[in-house]
Image (spheres, rainbow, N blue to C red):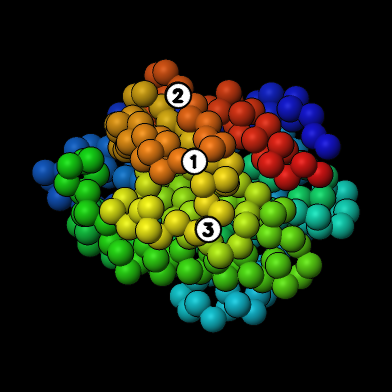
């Protein structure tokens, strides 16, 4: 069980000129790029005020996973066990945005202490990112253009990262967690991979949460959908003032999923929110997770 009061001060987004300050590390970009691209175009975007104990201490540990270990180049995920040391009955796997790490969202686990739920926060590999002048940073795939019209998906890296997430799912199943008690989620680039993995997964999952993101490789669908994908609970959320991934991305994703017959789709719009998260959104996410896992 969980009290939504734990999210009372869960998130505060601090934005300056569209550039996010989350473990700030300035990176060089071509002068032709807009100012906001100087800070991880699809990056973390959220500064969490942590009121509970930090996940970076005894509650965070490195993963040692058999299937996932076969995917080279990925740092060990941050793993946060169920609150009060209880048995693991369900797993939430949440993916960060471009330039961030698993630590960037790990505080969510202490803000949503759901009994029986283990959180896994994987970190992407370090790759050159064309959009940021070829600079190397953590990314689930390369990206060259942020516009809806000019964004061409990197098929190999998108599917490669999705395969890694599926390996984390398989590891959880091998440890005795039923697939329908495993939920995927992600922000920005992480949301792209969460959606890709969930829609194609051979396992029937509990649900998928995709925040400030979009559906990649659109032309693959509906052919690439798993047999049970359209019954998957989907939580979409997007801010109307997103200057990194425009609100249109969220609208197009909702429309595509509706056209394919998704029966349990919730698209939440947050007026005035940029490429970040807000308290109201995290409350909605907590309700979605609790309902999907039904512990």
Sort mark 1 into few (<14), some (14-19) or many (20+) by Cα contacts within 10 Å. Answer: some
How many numbered tags mark residues here?
3
Secondary structure found at label 2: strand
Residue 118, percent from left and from top: 74, 54
Q: Look at the numbered discs 3 and 2 and tell me whether their residues touch, using CB distance below 8 Å.
A: no
Q: Is residue 106 visible?
A: no
Secondary structure found at label 1: loop
Residue at the limit of the structure toward the left, as seen here: 32
Viewer-side label of 3, 2? 3
Q: Residue at x 49, y 27 (%)?
A: 268
3D distance between C-alphas at marks 3 and 1: 12 Å
Kindly identify which residue carries mark 2.
Answer: 269
Q: Is residue 174 above or below residue 186?
A: below
Q: Residue at x 41, y 43 (%)?
A: 260
Sort mark 2 into few (<14), some (14-19) or many (20+) by Cα contacts within 10 Å. Answer: some
Kindly identify which residue carries mark 3.
Answer: 227
Q: Is residue 226 visible?
A: yes
Horizontal relation, residue 192 to residue 105: left or right? left
Identify the mark at residue 262; answer none if there is no mark: 1
Residue 162, percent from left and from top: 46, 63
Q: Residue at x 67, y 75 (%)?
A: 64
């Amino acid at each position: 069980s969980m009290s939504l009061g734990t999210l009372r001060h869960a998130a505060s987004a601090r934005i300056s000129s569209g550039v996010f300050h989350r473990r700030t590390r300035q990176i060089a970009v071509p002068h032709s790029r807009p100012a906001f691209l100087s800070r991880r175009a699809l990056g973390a975007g959220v500064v969490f005020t942590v009121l509970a104990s930090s996940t970076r201490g005894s509650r965070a540990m490195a993963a040692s996973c058999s299937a996932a270990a076969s995917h080279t180049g990925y740092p060990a995920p941050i793993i946060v066990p169920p609150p009060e040391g209880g048995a693991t009955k369900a797993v939430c796997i949440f993916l960060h945005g471009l330039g961030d790490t698993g630590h960037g969202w790990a505080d969510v686990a202490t803000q949503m202490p759901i009994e029986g739920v283990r959180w896994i926060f994987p970190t992407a590999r370090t790759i050159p990112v064309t959009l940021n002048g070829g600079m190397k940073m953590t990314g689930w795939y390369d990206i060259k253009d942020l516009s809806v019209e000019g964004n061409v998906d990197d098929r190999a890296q998108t599917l490669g990262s999705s395969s890694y997430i599926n390996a984390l799912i398989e590891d959880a199943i091998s440890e005795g967690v039923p697939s329908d008690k495993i939920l995927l989620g992600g922000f920005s680039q992480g949301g792209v991979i969460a959606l890709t993995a969930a829609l194609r997964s051979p396992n029937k999952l509990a649900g998928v949460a995709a925040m400030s993101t979009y559906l990649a490789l659109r032309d693959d669908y509906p052919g690439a959908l798993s047999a049970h994908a359209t019954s998957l609970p989907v939580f979409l959320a997007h801010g109307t003032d997103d200057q990194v991934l425009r609100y249109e991305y969220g609208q197009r994703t909702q429309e595509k999923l509706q056209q394919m017959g998704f029966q349990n789709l919730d698209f939440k719009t947050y007026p005035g929110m940029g490429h970040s998260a807000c308290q109201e959104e995290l409350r909605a996410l907590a309700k979605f997770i609790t309902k999907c896992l039904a512990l």
